[in-house]
């Protein structure tokens, strides 16, 4: 834990739900509020893997920035082990409300705003009780935000979408195909659906919603969230696109020895495809084998972060709460095809469980990313100019895949196969389409990615007063005004 935030500037409490995919963008938002907008920040973190969290703290500001872990809550009596990951997260966050309330109340410098990620909206009443402004931070796309809020107000339309497998038409946005829809909608009738619908309702009560996207990335959807009557009526709160907020790769002087980076140093530029399924993704055993074969047949260099297959084949988010290294010495050999590691040892690196992804994607040797398209991984890829093979697994990832492959055309994706195994030939072909330098398609994708990378940089630029910089500056102004009101009231 670092020193408590203090001083006369506005102070915001940020709340991160479990999982690196939520903690990382919340930390980045906090850093930016401190360094660019002179806001003091305290970040409350609900149970996340301690070792990896520690590694993230190295690049955090040392003043006006504190991190407070909230005590772990035992929700085993409130969720079933088979419940969807989204249900588990939402229940954990709800049961963290008393801890959050006492932790905020214990701060010497009381924060005047609460900013929560999308799983933390149930804590808004704490902000109301303590007279704080309340903001949500959508750590994924504007399209997801529009769908979630609209879907919570149009249950009949969602039911039609699910039952007749027709697209969900969210006003002003690209329609959501059933095949790309949110996990929570596909599970209509299960607990996760009701839990998720509640998020949409709570989101609509925020004083503002920050989104990790930018104007050039999702201009049309952002416009719909702002101006289209049908959506504006359900969203109500102003929407602030503040992205792309991504974890920087460590600056050179703080680099620690890293085997993967050393290996990449020896490879030609843009010759390596990086393969990873985010902080919680795993593949069933049969799919792991096909992926190994596909990579081998593609003839391309690769770095692959591998996790053991889940006990239940369908449980593709199995590693979400547990990133423990495997015990025993066999490691990935146990579940990869026999001889794969020795046949590919001169052009491939298999990394068990976790790799320093931000550094890897920033390396010039990396020319493609096969990813589950979690939004942080996506942004890390785009901001490094790396086109993708997108392989969505759960949550809103199919929506992201559609955006990347069809709308932005910076990725290829497997055909729909109803959850079956993607075959080695298809994997080989996708990898080659992105990686082989002579492929026109790959070249065109790379150019589009570079345009997005540059537009993202412009959006964040303080000097150019870019759109995302200005949106966060507006939020900071609101915090400042509220802070002044609170100070004036306290003085009587
Ligand atoms: O070996 C690894 C694996 C992951 N990461 C980092 O962990 C983060 C993973 O985030 P993300 O790519 O968004 O994946 P998830 O952890 O799966 O993210 C959850 O949160 C995202 C943002 O809300 C959603 O888009 C996803 O669907 C949801 O699963 C990224 O910053 C990665 O760089 C590493 O550093 N090393």
Image: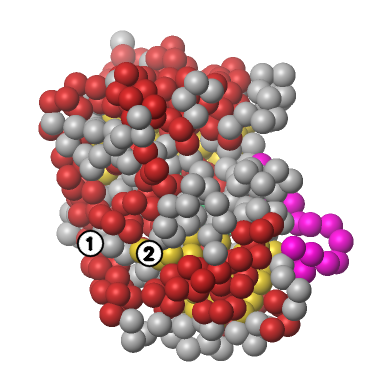
- Compared to 479, does 154 lie above or below? above
* Residue furthest to the right: 328
How far across and how far down the image is residue 230, in percent?
17, 25
- Compared to 97, does 326 lie above or below? below
The residue under the point 58% across, 32% down is: 84
- The residue tagged with tag 2: helix, strand or loop? strand
The residue under the point 43% across, 30% down is: 185
Q: Is residue 326 left or right of residue 277?
A: right
Disc assigned to residue 455: 1
Assign the magenta stretch its main secondary structure. Answer: loop
Residue 204 seen from this side = no
Q: Is residue 324 magenta?
A: yes
Question: Hey, which quadrant is residue 171 in on the image?
Answer: top left
- Compared to 104, does 263 lie above or below? below
Q: Is residue 234 magenta?
A: no
Q: Earlier in the sequence, mark 1 or mark 2?
A: 2
Pointer 2 residue: 412
Q: Nearer the viewer, residue 164 or 175?
A: 164
Residue 184 seen from this side = yes
How far across and how far down the image is residue 351, in percent?
66, 68
Span highlighted in magenta in the image? 321-335
């Amino acid at each position: 834990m670092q020193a408590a935030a203090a001083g006369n500037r506005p102070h915001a409490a940020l709340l991160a739900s479990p999982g690196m995919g939520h903690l990382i963008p919340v930390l980045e938002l906090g850093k930016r509020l401190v360094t660019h907008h002179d806001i003091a920040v305290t970040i409350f973190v609900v149970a996340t893997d301690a070792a990896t969290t520690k590694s993230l703290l190295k690049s955090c500001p040392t003043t006006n920035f504190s991190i407070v872990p909230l005590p772990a809550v035992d929700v085993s009596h409130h969720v079933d082990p088979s419940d969807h990951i989204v249900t588990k997260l939402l229940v954990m966050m709800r049961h963290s409300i008393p801890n959050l309330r006492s932790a905020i109340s214990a701060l010497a410098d009381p924060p005047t705003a609460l900013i929560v990620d999308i799983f933390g909206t149930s804590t808004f009443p704490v902000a109301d009780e303590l007279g704080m402004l309340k903001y949500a931070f959508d750590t994924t796309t504007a399209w997801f935000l529009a769908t979630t809020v609209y879907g919570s107000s149009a249950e009949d339309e969602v039911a039609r979408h699910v039952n007749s497998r027709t697209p969900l038409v969210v006003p002003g946005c690209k329609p959501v195909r059933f095949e790309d829809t949110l996990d929570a909608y596909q599970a209509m009738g299960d607990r996760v659906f009701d839990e998720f619908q509640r998020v949409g309702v709570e989101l609509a009560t925020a004083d503002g919603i920050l989104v990790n996207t930018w104007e050039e990335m999702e201009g049309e959807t952002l416009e719909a969230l702002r101006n289209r009557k049908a959506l504006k009526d359900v969203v109500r709160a102003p929407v602030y696109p503040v992205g792309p907020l991504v974890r920087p790769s460590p600056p050179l002087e703080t680099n620690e020895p890293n085997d993967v980076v050393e290996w990449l140093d020896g490879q030609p530029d843009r010759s390596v495809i990086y393969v990873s399924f985010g902080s919680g993704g795993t593949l069933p055993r049969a799919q792991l084998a096909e992926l190994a074969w596909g990579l081998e047949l593609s003839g391309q260099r690769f770095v692959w972060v591998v996790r053991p297959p889940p006990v239940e084949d369908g449980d593709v988010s199995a590693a979400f709460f547990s990133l423990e290294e495997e015990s025993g010495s066999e490691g990935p050999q146990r579940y990869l095809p026999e001889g794969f590691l020795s046949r590919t040892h001169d052009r491939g690196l298999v990394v068990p469980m976790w790799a320093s992804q931000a550094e890897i994607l920033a390396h010039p040797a990396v020319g493609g990313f096969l990813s589950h398209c979690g939004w942080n991984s996506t942004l890390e890829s785009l901001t490094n100019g790396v086109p993708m093979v997108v392989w969505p697994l759960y949550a809103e990832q199919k929506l992201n895949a559609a955006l990347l492959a069809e709308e932005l055309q910076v990725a290829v994706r497997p055909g729909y196969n109803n959850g079956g195994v993607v075959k080695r030939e298809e994997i080989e072909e996708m990898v080659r389409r992105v990686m082989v330098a002579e492929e026109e398609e790959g070249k065109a994708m790379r150019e589009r990615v570079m345009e997005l990378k540059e537009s993202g940089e412009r959006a964040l630029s303080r000097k150019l007063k870019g759109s995302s910089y200005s949106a966060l500056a507006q939020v900071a102004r609101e915090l400042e005004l509220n802070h002044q009101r609170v100070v004036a009231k306290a003085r009587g």
